[in-house]
Image (spheres, rainbow, N blue to C red):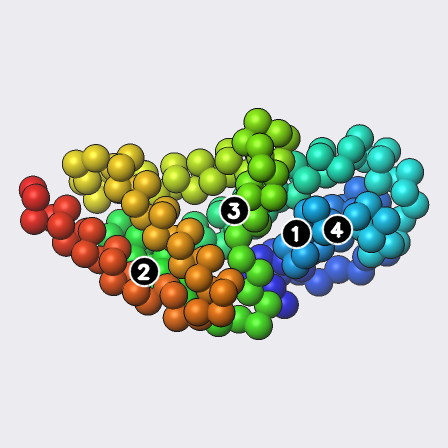
Amino acid sequence: MRVTSLSHATGPSSAESEEPRERVLRAAYELFCRQGVRATGVDRIVDEAGVARMTLYRNFHSKDELVQAVLDLREKLWTRGWVERELETRGSSPEEKLLGIFDLFDEWFRREDYEGCLFIGCLLESHDRASAMGSTSALQLAKVHELLRALMEEAGARDPDALADQWQMLMAGAIVLAMQGKLDAARPARDAAALLLESEGSSH
């Protein structure tokens, strides 16, 4: 079971017991995470959800609107429900939490159901940051940046915004390398991140 699947977050449930909107959203979420948005047609989504095509469009006026809803859900499950929650248990100081991101990623990358970052994937698929998919993806990545920046401020960084940028670059790079099959990518990323913190500390 994917660590950020709907069933992981909400508990097992029968698809028949869900409202049609939730069934469509569940099916789209799982398909987009596994296959990407462009490769997933509406017909496949309604087939997986077990609903009529008109049911999808009654709840989501377009595929773009459905994509936005899935990305919002991903933020709820991945950023808030998984990363942020896990970091609270992996360290008491902001520095420990920041480095804990890469420990968490190391476990994630080694899962058989590792699916990469939906935000990055959608942003690249859109080819247009101004589009509905592109802008929503960029917004969700900005929320990850906000989480990092808050930890940087708590750690007393001189330039928390710039350091959060560097941290997010290491995270994104590790995610992409893991998609290439380099499952230990989080470890060198953690080493590089530790050097950033060390450099920050020595400059105080």
Instruction: Tell me the SS state at disc 4.
Output: loop
User: At label 4, which amino acid type do we have?
Assistant: Thr
Residue 2 shows in this picture: yes
Residue tagged 4: 40
Category of crowding for the residue at label 3, using alpha-carbon neighbours closer than 10 angstroms: few (below 14), some (14–19), many (at least 20):
some
Image position of 83 (left or right of 19): left
Disc nearer the start of the sequence (3/1): 1
Q: Could you tell me residue 18's position as x and y percent?
A: 81, 50
What residue do we see at 56% from left, 48% from top? Answer: 121
Q: Could you tell me residue 154's position as x and y percent?
A: 24, 41
Quadrant in which residue 97 is drawn: bottom left
Nearest to the observer: residue 49 or residue 175: 175
3D distance between C-alphas at marks 3 and 1: 11 Å
Category of crowding for the residue at label 2, using alpha-carbon neighbours closer than 10 angstroms: few (below 14), some (14–19), many (at least 20):
many
Quadrant in which residue 115 is drawn: bottom right
Instruction: Tell me the SS state at disc 2.
Output: helix
What's the mark number on residue 36?
1
Image position of 92 (left or right of 127): left
Quadrant in which residue 55 is drawn: top right
Residue tagged 3: 120
3D distance between C-alphas at marks 2 and 1: 25 Å
What's the mark number on residue 189?
2
3D distance between C-alphas at marks 2 and 3: 18 Å
What's the mark number on residue 56?
none
